[in-house]
Image (cartoon, rainbow, N blue to C red):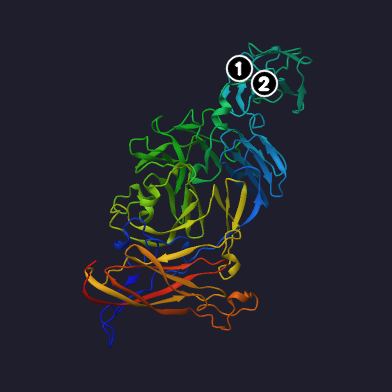
Amino acid sequence: MYVAGNRGRAPGSARSVLHTSKFRGIDLYNSPSNVEGGRSPSAPNMVRDEIGKVRKRMGYHKVHEFPGAVNGAFRLGEQKFFHAGEKLYAQDGTELYSGMKNNRSRGWQIGGKLYLQDGKALLCCDGETVQPVKGHGYVPTLIISRSPEGGGTVYEPINMLQDEFINSFYGKSTVKVYQLTDGDLSEAAVTAKKMTADGAWQELEENTDFTVDRVTGQVTFVTAPGESPVTGEDNVKITASKTREGYADKIDRCDVSVLYGVNGAADRLFVTGNPDCPNRDYYSQMGDPTYFGDLWYGVLGQESSRILGYSIIGDRLGAHKDEGEDGRNVILRSGTLTDGTAAFPIVNSLQGPGAISKYAFARLGKEPLFLTSRGVYAITSEDITGEKYSQSRSFYVNRKLQEENGLEEAVSAVFGDFYLLAVNGGIYVLDGLQKSYSSGEPYSSYQYECYRFENIGARCLWVWDDTLYFGAQDGKVYAFYHDPEDPASYNDDGQAITAWWELPEMDGKLFYRNKTFRYLAVRLSSAIATGVQVFGRQKGMWKLLYDAGAKARYLDFSYIDFEKFVFSSDTTPKTAGRKIRMKNADTVRLRLQNAQYNEPFGIYDVAVEFTENGRYRG
C-alpha cells in the first residue's frame, strides 16, 4: 500500500517522506494523480510476487514451430497434438490429419479418445489415426418389438452423425416382407441378421438372403425369418442407411463446447456455435460423443442472440448469450433423469452483460469468468436473496480493455492463481489472491488486482504440467520459464524484457506548494544479476535520475556473467538509495525500471524524501 509513513517532518529536518511498502496492481482506470498508493498507473510486464511485492514477469522460449497459425494444443494421455493451419500434428511434427478449418479449436478426452471441434467437422483421434465422427459413430436402434408390417416401440433417437440405423423386429412365422421405419434409403448396403433356434445370430446378405426396395423401405426375405425362438425377444434386426440432409452439419459446424451431464457430471459433450442455429445447443450420449440424438437439443433465448460459451455453476450449466438478448444473458439449466432419460430443463436466467468472446471462458478458483464488452465478469451468488447474477472483476483495467479492438478474438487461460486474457499482443492478468472493493463498481462485491504483460502475441493459451504455453499466428509455440530464481528465465525468446513500476503522481501534502525531491531509496529483491534505473517525470519530461546496476546482486558460481560480476554473497533484499534533485515542481512521477537481458527485478519498498517551500508558480 502507498502510505504516508513518517509523512510529517523527519527529526532534525524539514523533509517529508512518502513510503510504499505494499504493492498491489495497476490502475488503468483512474488518472495517475488519482491512483491509490500501492497501485501503479503504468507497470508493463510486472506481476505479483509474494503478496504485497511485485517483480518482473518471466519470459518464454520457442519449443515448436509449424507451417500455419496455431489454433489449439491437446493431450491424450502423455501424447501431445497441435492444430496449426488446416492440419493436426503430433508433437514430433508428424502430420496426422489435413483438412481442418483454420480456426481456433477445442479438444476433449472422453473414453480414452480425443475429440476435436473446429467448426468444420467433429473429429476423433485414438492417438495414431484421426477421422471424422460423421459416418463412424454409434448406430442407434430406432425401434424395437416391431412387427413386420410396422408399429413397435421407439427405443433410441436418430444419430445426427450417422446415416445407419437399426430396426428390431418380432418376427412372424410366414411373413417375408418387413417394413422399415424409413424409406428413401441410401445406396449403402443393407444388412440383416436373425436369431437361430439356439439363440445365436445368423448374418444375412442383401441380394442373397433378401432384397431391398430403397424407395419404400421394404425388405423382402427369400425365406421367412419366422417367429422368435425366445418368447418376448426380437429375432430380426435390419441395419440400413438414410441420408438426412443437414443433420451432421448441425453438429459439425459447432465450435463451442463443454462437458456436462446429469447432476453436474462431466460425461456428455454439449456443443453450440453453429451460425445457422445461433440459440441452439446439442448434447451427446453419456460418455459417447459419436452419438448426438436428433431430439437432444435445447433452444435458449432469442434466435437473434448467439450462445458464445458455457460456465459450470455448482451442478448447473450456464449458457452465455451475446448482447443480443434482453439482459438475461446467462441461461441456467440443470441435469436430471426423467423416467430414466436424461433431460436438461431451463431453471433460471441471470441478469448481466452478454459475452463477447467464445475463447475467454475460464474458472478462477470457484468463480467462472468470462469477457464482455465492459470487461471481465464473474457469475456469483448474492448473499441476501440467494439469486445469482454477474459482477465485474476487472475494474482497474476496464478503461484500457474497452479500447482494445477485436475483443471477440480474446483468449483466456487460468495459470496458478491468475486469470490471463490475451488480446492484441498483450495479456491482462487478474490476480485471484488479491481482491479489493472499488466504489467505481458498487454492484460488485470486489475486484481482482490486475497486471498487464506486453510483447506476447498469443493466439491461444494453455497449461501443461504446471507450465504456461502459447501459440502464435506465425506457427510458433512458446513455453514460459518457471524458475523465478534463474536469471535465464528473464528473456522473451532471446530478447530482453522491459519492465517498470511507476509510482502514482506525487503532489505532497499541499498540491499548490513548491516541492524539491531530494532522495529516493528502493529496496530490491536480491538476485544473481539485477538492477534498477530510476526515472523522474517533471513538466511532462522524463529523465534518468540514477542507475543502480549492481546494488542488489550476489555471487553464485553456478551463474557467472563477468559484465555483472560482484563479490557479495548476501542474498537478502538490498537497498539502493541515491540523492536526486527535482526542484521547483508541483508534482512529479517516478519510474523504477529494468530492461536488461536475463535480469530478475523485484521491488520490496520505495521511499522518497522531499521538501515543500513557497507556492508553486509554474
Residue at left offset 56%, top offset 25%: 247
Badge 1 density bin: few <14, some 14–19, many ≥20, Cα 10 Å: some
State the residue in front, 406 or 120. 406
Residue placed under numbered mark 1 in the picture: 182
Query: In the rendering, at what x and y percent does residue 1 appear?
Result: 35, 70
**Residue visible at 64% across and 75% down in the picture:** 560
Q: In this image, 381 relative to 262: left or right?
A: left
Quote the CA–CA distance across marks 2 and 1.
9 Å
Q: Which quarter of the picture shows residue 581?
A: bottom left
Q: Amino acid at mark 1?
A: Asp
Q: Is residue 379 visible?
A: yes
Viewer-proximal residue, 292 or 43?
Answer: 43
Q: Residue at x 49, y 75 (%)?
A: 525
CB within 8 Å, label 2 to label 1: yes
State the mark number for residue 240.
2
Say which label, 2 or 1, has the lower sequence index: 1
At mark 2, the secondary structure is strand
Query: Is there any visible trace of residue 392 in the rendered image?
Result: no
